[in-house]
Amino acid sequence: MSAGGTLVVGSGFVGTGIARRLAAAGEPVTVTSRHRPEHLPDLPGIRWHALDATDSAACGRLVARLDPRRIVLVHGPSDVTWCEEHPDLAVAAHTAAAAHFAALAGDARLLMISTDNVFDGSRPDNPEDAPVSPANAYGRAKLRAERTVLDAAADAVVLRVSLVYGHEPADAGKWLNFFAACAHRLRRGEQVRVPRDQWTTPVLVDDVAEVTAALLGAGAPLPPVLHLGGPDRVS
């Protein structure tokens, strides 16, 4: 790949959605993860590269080779239950990759996808200047990564997204987003158990990708933190 283009660190549901949107617009994209995703979009312009984002030397070699002009961090374990069971590992994974790429970004725009889990849910809404107070290990890990990125990178922005939903194949090879998991279970005639005491503003993965692309292409300096949710607050 020639110098430039976008490096997407993380090949999960959101990372591949962002890569698909950028590649469709003609942007050369490199997607990285430890293991090759089973459903990487088959589009010209998307390449996959094996990378352990907690390995600083490996990250340095990749950035030197690609010289990306934009870097998107969609990394780290996002299974809230797993993070709760392994809080130290969750923090280590999220902050290590954030620190490596923040130090390597140089003049590249660095955009980190974060989460509304940095809030404790005590308010019906949270503007960008609302005090953060994570109520779970996933939120604490993401908040540490946010601060790492914003403290170290010159042109960085954190995009906090609400619950992301959209289609995923039933054989995606990992846990599915909540919407897709429910849809596949219902199609199989299985019972679906859902919480009744949680509220969120779900946002379609295509919209996350669209907003990410717009932020990457914005010429003017961006606010350091932005929020993205869907149009409706639902249980």
Image (tube, rainbow, N blue to C red):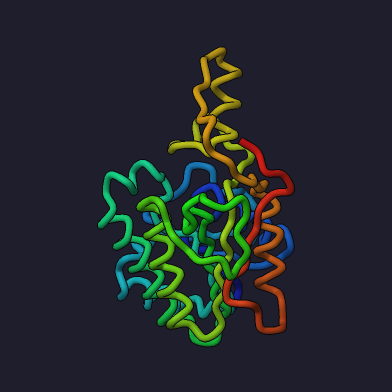
Q: Residue furthest front?
A: 122
Residue found 56% across the figure and 82% down from its top: 155
Residue 119 place in picture, x, y as percent: 49, 57
Residue located 42% across and 57% down the image: 134
The percent coordinates of residue 145 (x first, y second) are: 41, 67
Q: Looking at the image, how many numbered discs can be counted on the residues?
A: 0
Splitting the image into 4 quarters, where does residue 182 fall? top right
Tell which of 139 and 221 is nearer to you: 139
- Which sits in the foreground, 30 or 15? 15
| 233 relative position to 63: left or right | right
Where 128 falls versus 137 (above or below)? Answer: below
Give the vertical position of 178 relative to 13 (above or below). Answer: above
Q: Residue at x 56, y 61 (%)?
A: 160
Please state the horizontal and vertical placement of residue 122, each as a whole percent of the image: 52, 51
- Quarter location, residue 148: bottom left
State the image coordinates of residue 104 (x, y, percent, origin top left): 43, 81
Q: Quadrant of the N terminus?
A: bottom right
User: Residue, x 52% and y 56% (percent of image)?
Assistant: 115
- As drawn, the residue found furthest toward the top would be 189
Q: Quadrant of the C terminus?
A: top right
Answer left or right for 138 relative to 180. Answer: left
Q: Is residue 203 visible?
A: yes
Name the side, left or right, on which 122 lies relative to 233: left
Can residue 2 be seen in the rendering of this structure?
no
* Above or below, 199 relative to 158: above
Q: Is residue 87 left or right of residue 19?
A: left
